[in-house]
């Protein structure tokens, strides 16, 4: 990884800035430096940014509450986890928009009820006539065009926070987007885009097509559907690099265990982290459940229970 030498505007010290970051704090005076690197196809200047609504104190409170509220099968150390590192990061992402439409075809099922009469025997063996109903389905082909609408998709441009991780703390209120200015990042860590524009746009198109498919599926009439084929069109595509506010916590919960990463949406406070489970607690719960079943079988007998 190459580094860029930046001169602190406050004390004049030279700071080495890693290529994947856009900001750095001076180790001597604490001033924050923001660098606008020369733009490229994969690393253009950000177009928009979302501000942090959740400050550090609030983020720490959310992290503590999250740790205390984990389920009974989580590792016992989670509730006593200590934050090794707390960092507010502007994460790069691509905001993709397009006019979407689809040509579709499917088989649509309409349910109807059939009443039939049959002969059986009663408890004394005498023939009796009864009726019963059953559901039948009439299938017919249907096709059409789904009207176009505007679609918005956000995909990560960061290798550090992948798309699944970013989606887990969405949504972000994009109505609060502001035009990017370098001073907007002062005092924060801001990551450069580390995934190529082509990679991100391919991901955005894939997500857009999946969203259109689900919308067409929900739009279809009938009680049932099968063999849905959907040819999606995406037109008038636009893509802007945006910076999204995310709090990143590194939590230590047990000696010898790797730290746990907790992500908090810096706008809404939504917190998501992978919780390690406790094998002894799960085993104890299983044994307790099996013991309870055995007790009931012995106390009441198999015949009484079933």
Image (tube, rainbow, N blue to C red):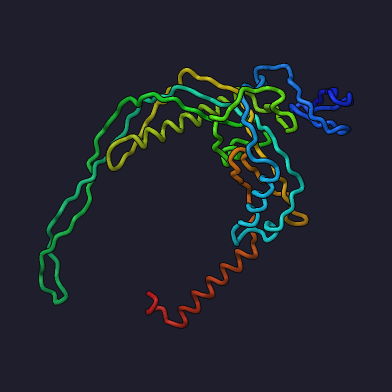
Res. 214 image quadrant: top left
Residue 253 is situated, as x and y percent measured from the top left of the image, at 72, 55
- Classify 140 as above or below 241: below
Look at 71% across and 30% down and name the residue there.
190
14, 253: nearer the viewer: 14
Res. 49 image quadrant: top right
- Classify 290 as above or below 164: below
For this view, does 242 lie left or right of residue 6? left
Residue 275 visible at all: yes
For this view, does 89 lie left or right of residue 226? right
Residue 196 is situated, as x and y percent measured from the top left of the image, at 64, 24
Look at 46% across and 27% down and name the residue there.
151
Look at 69% across and 27% down and name the residue there.
184
The quarter of the rendered structure image containing the C terminus is: bottom left
The quarter of the rendered structure image containing the N terminus is: top right
Residue 20 visible at all: no
117, 69: nearer the viewer: 69
């Amino acid at each position: 990884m190459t580094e860029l030498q930046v001169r602190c505007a406050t004390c004049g010290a030279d700071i080495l800035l890693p290529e994947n970051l856009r900001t750095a704090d001076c180790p001597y005076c604490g001033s924050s430096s923001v660098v606008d690197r020369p733009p490229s196809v994969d690393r253009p200047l950000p177009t928009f940014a979302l501000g942090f609504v959740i400050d550090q104190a609030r983020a720490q409170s959310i992290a503590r509450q999250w740790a205390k509220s984990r389920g009974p099968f989580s590792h016992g150390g989670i509730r006593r986890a200590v934050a090794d590192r707390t960092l507010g990061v502007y994460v790069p992402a691509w905001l993709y928009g397009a006019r979407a439409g689809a040509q579709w075809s499917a088989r649509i099922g309409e349910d109807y009820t059939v009443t039939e009469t049959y002969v059986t025997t009663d408890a004394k063996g005498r023939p009796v006539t009864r009726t019963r109903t059953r559901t039948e389905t009439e299938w017919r082909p249907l096709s059409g065009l789904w009207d176009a609408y505007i679609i918005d998709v956000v995909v990560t441009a960061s290798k550090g926070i992948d798309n699944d991780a970013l989606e887990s703390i969405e949504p972000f209120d994009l109505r609060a987007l502001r035009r990017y200015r370098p001073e907007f990042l002062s005092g924060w860590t801001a990551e450069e885009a580390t995934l190529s524009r082509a990679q991100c746009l391919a991901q955005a198109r894939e997500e857009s097509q999946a969203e259109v498919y689900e919308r067409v599926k929900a739009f279809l009439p009938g009680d049932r559907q099968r063999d849905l084929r959907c040819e999606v069109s995406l037109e008038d595509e636009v893509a802007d690099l945006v910076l999204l506010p995310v709090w990143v916590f590194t939590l230590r919960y047990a000696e010898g265990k790797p730290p746990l990463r907790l992500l908090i949406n810096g706008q809404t406070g939504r917190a998501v982290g992978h919780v390690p489970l406790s094998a002894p607690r799960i085993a104890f719960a299983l044994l307790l459940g099996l013991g309870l079943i055995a007790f009931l079988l012995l106390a009441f007998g198999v015949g009484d229970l079933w």
